[in-house]
Image: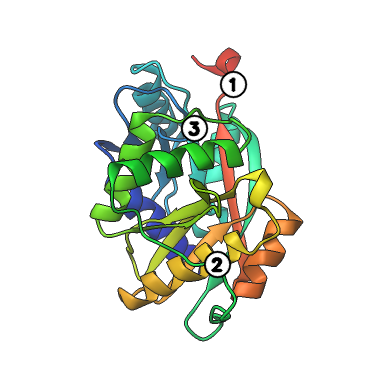
Amino acid sequence: MDIQVQSFAVANLRRRPVVVETGGFVAGLTPGTDNPYLNYATPLPGAEPTEHDVAELIGVFRDRGLLPRLEFAPQAAPGVAPVLRAAGFATEAVHEYLVCTPRTLVPRSAGSPRVESPATDRDYAELDTALAEAFGGVFAPSAEGAARLRRTQENGGAVRFVRAPQGGIAGGASCSPPAEGTAELAGVGTRPAHRGRGVAAAVTAALTEAMFAQGAGSVWLEYSGEGSRRVYERTGYRPQGTRLYVSLPPAQQP
């Protein structure tokens, strides 16, 4: 599964507005923001970069005033991490990823919250606001955030949410368009006041079902804590591997 997840990561970055390929790496960049989560690179599966290749990649980011940063499944390209570390890259995080297939998917129960797809500008804006609150203000709600959700939905991915009983949106998530036979489900978030009511499980199951209906053979995601992991496992997700996040500290940049 590591090769498939890494192949997906490459295909997904190639969808970015600006794509630079150099020395076995693919960098996907987003103009107008220096957000490191919207500007990063990943290696091709099996890549064996040289010191020169890594220096070229660092230049791609440095020339644009961006933090050199990568996300990848290390087992899909074992020769990459040692060369990056030799160049000064440090680990930000190591995340386990979980995978669901049609065989393991647990159907939604009759009592699950009603899940909807956004249909209006207001829906996208309210969902962006709800997710900003769900993630503790890590990002601020914005017109661009709402636009990214719309692009995901319109470009072959899926966005789902659950309305709050008193109005507004309780929580939601999105899933990328499928590539390489799989899709990434991300950004599952529920506002604090609505947690513990099955919102995350409902949108996770609905998005996973939507990707299988589009022909994906699997859906994968990363989780942020044991509580969320239990939600995903109840939906049918199982551990499959890890993803490594690394960046070059400013003091190390040449």
Counting other residues with Cα less than 10 Å from the Cα at mark 2, is it few (<14), some (14-19), or many (20 or more)? some
The residue at which mark 1 appears reads as 249
Q: Percent x, y for residue 169?
A: 49, 48
Rendered residue at 26%/60% (across/down)? 156
Quarter holding residue 28: top left
Rendered residue at 46%/61% (across/down)? 5
Query: Quick check: 2 left or right of 97?
Result: left
The residue at which mark 3 appears reads as 69
Residue 24 visible? The answer is no
- Image disc number at residue 41: none
Which residue of the protein is positioned furthest toward the right in this rendering? 226
- Image disc number at residue 113: 2
Quarter holding residue 18: top left
Q: Say what secondary structure mark 1 lies in.
A: loop
Rendered residue at 65%/51% (across/down)? 194
Q: Do tag 1 and tag 3 residues touch (Cβ < 8 Å)?
A: no
Q: Say what secondary structure mark 3 lies in.
A: strand
- For the residue marked with disc 2, what is the amino acid? Pro
Which residue of the protein is positioned furthest toward the front in this rendering? 166
Circle 2 or circle 1, nearest the eye = 2
- For the residue marked with disc 3, what is the amino acid? Arg
Q: Say what secondary structure mark 2 lies in.
A: loop
Q: Of callouts 2 and 1, which one flags the residue occurring earlier in the amino acid sequence?
A: 2
Rendered residue at 52%/64% (across/down)? 204
Residue 54 visible? The answer is yes
| Vertical relation: 60 (above or below) 93 | above
Quarter holding residue 149: top left
Q: Of callouts 2 and 3, which one flags the residue occurring earlier in the amino acid sequence?
A: 3
Q: Percent x, y for residue 90?
A: 63, 31
Alpha carbon distance from label 1 to label 3:
9 Å
- For the residue marked with disc 1, what is the amino acid? Pro
| Vertical relation: 235 (above or below) 177 | below
